[in-house]
Image (cartoon, rainbow, N blue to C red):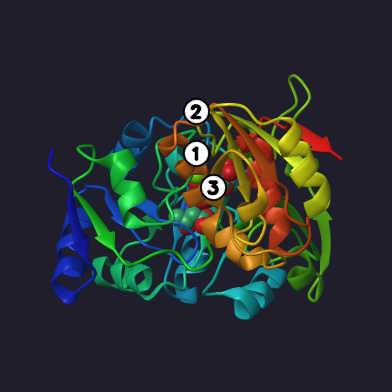
Amino acid sequence: METALLPVSPDSLQRAAALLQAGQIVGMPTETVYGLAANAADPEAVARIFTAKGRPSDNPLIVHIAELSALPQLADPPALAYKLAKAFWPGAMTMVLPRRDTVPDCVTAGLDTVGIRMPSHPAAAALIRESGLALAAPSGNRSGSPSPATAAQMLADMDGRIPMILDGGPCEVGVESTVILVREDSVRLLRPGGVTADDLREFCLVEVDDGVLHPLADGEAAASPGMKYRHYAPAAEVTLVTGTAEAFAEFVTAHTASGVAVMASREELPRLPGLHVPFGRQGDPESQARELFTALRRCDELGAETVYVHCPPKRGIGLAVYNRLLRAAAFREIVL
Ligand code: TXA
Ligand code: MG
């Protein structure tokens, strides 16, 4: 199959919408990461997503909508969900809610909840409207590799596996949406993202799920199935290093060898040894989120065997970056 990479235009949106209506799957830009979209109501189309990604079938998909009126058709939301929707949609927040029977089992992986998000990227909203469908869409990477932050990164993973990717430019946020389980008057943070725990605390109690920062114990069930897999990982062995810029520089100088890469801010890189992987700007977690997945893919392009990552602060969106890095590093972290 030829994979067409088309810039977003009225014509390409129409072609993508027609493919979706015909049960095909399409690469779609969102403000978080690129997604691989299918008609959420069509189990055969949804099955194509799992095949193209090589995704385990017990990992549920997020359903994307463009209007709040689509929400009660898919889920049975408590009042708090509407408050949060008003504050954070369209945007980088996915709410896990009690599902309705209209959502096929293959989307929810048989759970009695469904994850729903209203993306803010204009091309994603236009595609949902043009197709007239709710779109199930996981991140557009092959299962296990870093999520795509650009159309070219998605093409590298999906070339020949899907008919089309809409190119809407690089993603603004760079890490996937915040996933929260919404209850009557509190939420449980399952995956940190662009909408931070502090943003949510303005509206309700926020409990951070253990899975956000810790590996699951053997046999423990994941609240968010996607968080249990080794994820976002380059071929190299990744180790997180937490400490000041000085301590990090000392550490990597002591551990340099051929095949060793360092992933650190642009300000730090010039005085570090090894293969350089730029990772945002110092003290600017938004830029580190935006560059995270490009940096992880860069490690492979450089043929790195070992990567030392200077760990960003774990606050705000930095928590989302840290959560992804922990999985890329299989939880290997050195605190200096
Ligand atoms: O920003 C995003 O969320 C992107 C864009 C494309 O919207 N999508 C994305 O999808 O990251 P995916 O499939 O790569 O990650 C979805 C995460 C997984 O960890 C999955 O287990 C969790 O959300 N999830 C989905 N539905 C769930 C549910 N009903 N209960 C618990 N976790 C759920
Ligand atoms: Mg994903």
Using the image, determine if residue 59 lies above or below residue 17.
above
- Residue ID for mark 2: 235
Q: Residues within 10 Å of mark 1 (few under 14, many from 20)?
A: many
Earlier in the chain: of badge 1 and badge 3, it is 3
Look at the numbered disc 3 and give the secondary structure of its residue: strand
What numbered label is drawn on residue 299? Answer: 1
Q: Residues within 10 Å of mark 3 (few under 14, many from 20)?
A: many
What amino acid is found at the position of numbered circle 2 in the picture?
A: Ala
Labelled pair 1, 2 in contact (Cβ < 8 Å): yes
* Image coords of residue 223 (percent x, y): 70, 40
Labelled pair 2, 3 in contact (Cβ < 8 Å): no
What amino acid is found at the position of numbered circle 3 in the picture?
A: Val
- Residue ID for mark 3: 277
What amino acid is found at the position of numbered circle 1 in the picture?
A: Cys
> In this image, 58 relative to 51: left or right?
right
> In this image, 179 relative to 18: left or right?
right
Cβ of mark 2 under 8 A from ligand 2: no
* Image coords of residue 314 (percent x, y): 78, 55
Image quarter (top left, top right, bottom left or bottom right) of the C terminus: top right
Residue at 32% x, 67% y is 168
> In this image, 26 relative to 306: left or right?
left
Earlier in the chain: of badge 1 and badge 2, it is 2
Image quarter (top left, top right, bottom left or bottom right) of the N terminus: top left
Residue at 20% x, 74% y is 9
